[in-house]
Image (cartoon, helix red, strand yellow):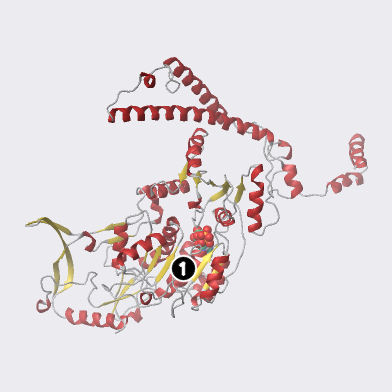
Amino acid sequence: MSASEISTKRVQKRKIEDKSSSRRKKVKRAHRTIDELPWKTIVKPREAGIDGDDGILELEEIEGVEVVYEETGAGRVIKFNVIEDQEVPINDDLEPEEGKEVARTPIPPNLNVEEVTAFDSAELLPAWHKFSLHPQLLKALHSKGFNEPTPIQAAALIPAMGDRDVVGVAQTGSGKTLAYGLPILHYLLSQPRPVPGAKRHVRALILAPTRELALQVSSHLNACLNDIDNSAIISTDDPTTTSKNNGKAEKGRGKQKHVESHAIKPPPHVSVASIVGGMSAQKQRRILDRGVDVLVATPGRLWDIMEEAKLIFREDQIDEGLQSGDEQEDSKEEIKDGLQTFVFSATLSKDLQRNVKRRSRPKSAGKYKRRDAKPASTLVFLSSIDGIRRLMPLMELLNVKAFPLHSQLEQRQRLKNLDRFTTTPNAVLLATDIAARGLDIAAVDHVIHYQVPRSADSYVHRNGRTARAMRKGFSLLMCAPDERRVLRALLGNLSRHDEIPEISIELNLLDKLKYRVQLARKIETSHHKIKKANHERNWMRETAAAMEIELDSDYLSDDDEEKPSTQKRKAKDSKNAALKAELKHLLSLPLIARGVSAKYITSGSRPIVDDLITGQTHEKLVGLKKVEAGSSLVAPKKKKKQPMKEEFEEWAAIGAED
Ligand SMILES: Nc1ncnc2c1ncn2[C@@H]1O[C@H](COP(=O)(O)OP(=O)(O)OP(=O)(O)O)[C@@H](O)[C@H]1O
């Protein structure tokens, strides 16, 4: 029996039941464990941000649960009774027997559920029209203001929607998520709605290389679906009479109602969930048990859950297996019929290319480059966590709003820092390469490689955090003289035989900056020493106390280098205070003297002349207009008789030199 047949039968049964009396009824169902309860995921408003709810990414709620404690011979046992106060059609003869399952999501009697589907894409989104996407996706694209597909989307959609496997290689930030996400959602939305109560099986699997990316992909796809489910309409009688999302109800053939959030909500047509490491495995298992259509996962956590439960991914359970992210490998040796595979990345390593060739019928979706302008925040990449730890206090002393992101932070803290970084203007994120792949932070203006990346791939992915979604970006690589060889090798791997252009720095400015940083470093080093000495002394004391031994008086002496005398400490404190005051004063001064505009060639604030020669100036630079130097000199010569004599002579003299 097909899903739609089941659905029709259920509806018919409801119709029969409705002929009998209908009244409110309390239905009580007993559950043994918390996990069995019918938790409902709350769709969080996207604007809420991570910070606003203390780093919680997904919330679940439950209503009407009675907790019952029972004393048994084996001890105290907890039971949960779910009490549902439902308007259920009740025929006294058909009343459910005690303990019998009642449909979890009640279907209103005599109602069919049908979404509103019309969207005039020819008129409203002409650039998307030819792809014939599901109207509700078009609606979501429209509400996001995505008026045209990015080139990778335009190149990928047709083959992907035509059941082809697709390999998409496109620059970072070019919209790859929707390039494979839209075909998945389109396919699933075009299938009949799942029968309420029936368990969903994973129909699309998206693998992403990092936790943050997996969460981001899942929220990106959910955002496309949220718009959809909010506009669902329940129509009576005949689904074909369902009117459009313009809210006009057809008269005569049946009544229609908008499903308000407080009204009975149908289960989502398509559900997307993520399972990633670092977050509650129990909850994620619960999500899987409940069933999900699109699963976005990091390979590690997916593997753990699969190993443990041996449950989810038998080949025959995956209707449509999809992969994304960077170089995730298909674990199956052969392509199964009906399995469609997408591989999307900004880089395509040799290994992956070989894999893809062996297993599928790839169709390259295109490459492109684009940039434009927008000043904002800076993402600084370091190769070590220690480096980040040492830089953080320096940043604070220099009044830079910096946040760390590395693998030794708890997942919640990582997400919180990421959120703070995105919401704080001109902030700096000090990150290891865990932030290099896939993170889509709209307004990263600068990427700085504080340390040379270890591989060409890292270089590409790090850079990809800026210049996203048609914005402009800027990447700076810091390289010591002895690292030039490494850098050249790295560029060679990228088949870039030209050097990265060097950034010219004005020494006057550099000196000022350097002095400020040196001051901050002095203060930080002194703080660090004091902290370290205190820490060691405390450790020694605590260990001695724990071992019940007495410490040699040397360790406690005031003469000890580690523990300076009060006098020495006071001297140090006042030296530090003076350094801090000096730094504070310097930081309050502008780097370029007041009254000097940085916009004029003569200001000396930046090497504009060099920029002019290399053609790297901004068009809007004040006082800058491209003219032939000679032509402006020749012009006055022609006006021989007009100006005063001396003026003419002056021009002539310059002209002659020329
Ligand atoms: N058609 C579109 N029009 C405008 N913006 C879009 C469009 N499609 C996607 N975007 C936006 O572009 C940004 C980058 O998209 P996405 O994260 O999918 O890039 P990506 O190619 O996967 O990057 P990466 O390789 O770094 O993972 C996102 O903010 C996304 O919302």
Q: In the displayed orientation, state which residue is furthest to the top.
A: 567
**Is 517 on the left-hand or right-hand side of 4?**
right
Q: Disc 1 designates what residue? A: 323
The quadrant where residue 588 appears: top right
Instruction: Please name whichever residue, 347 or 42, is drawn nearer the observer in this view of the structure.
Output: 347
Residue 127 showing in the rendered view = no
Quadrant showing the N terminus: bottom left
Residue 485 picture location, percent across and down: 66, 49
Residue 516 showing in the rendered view = yes
Quadrant showing the C terminus: top right
Say if 486 sits above or below 283 in the image. Answer: above
Say if 560 sits above or below 636 in the image. Answer: above
> Which residue is at a point 56% across and 69% down the rendered structure image?
353
Residue 445 picture location, percent across and down: 56, 49
Residue 223 picture location, percent across and down: 41, 62
Residue 218 picture location, percent across and down: 41, 62
Instruction: Please name whichever residue, 185 or 504, is drawn nearer the observer in this view of the structure.
Output: 504
The amino acid type found where label 1 is placed reads: Gln
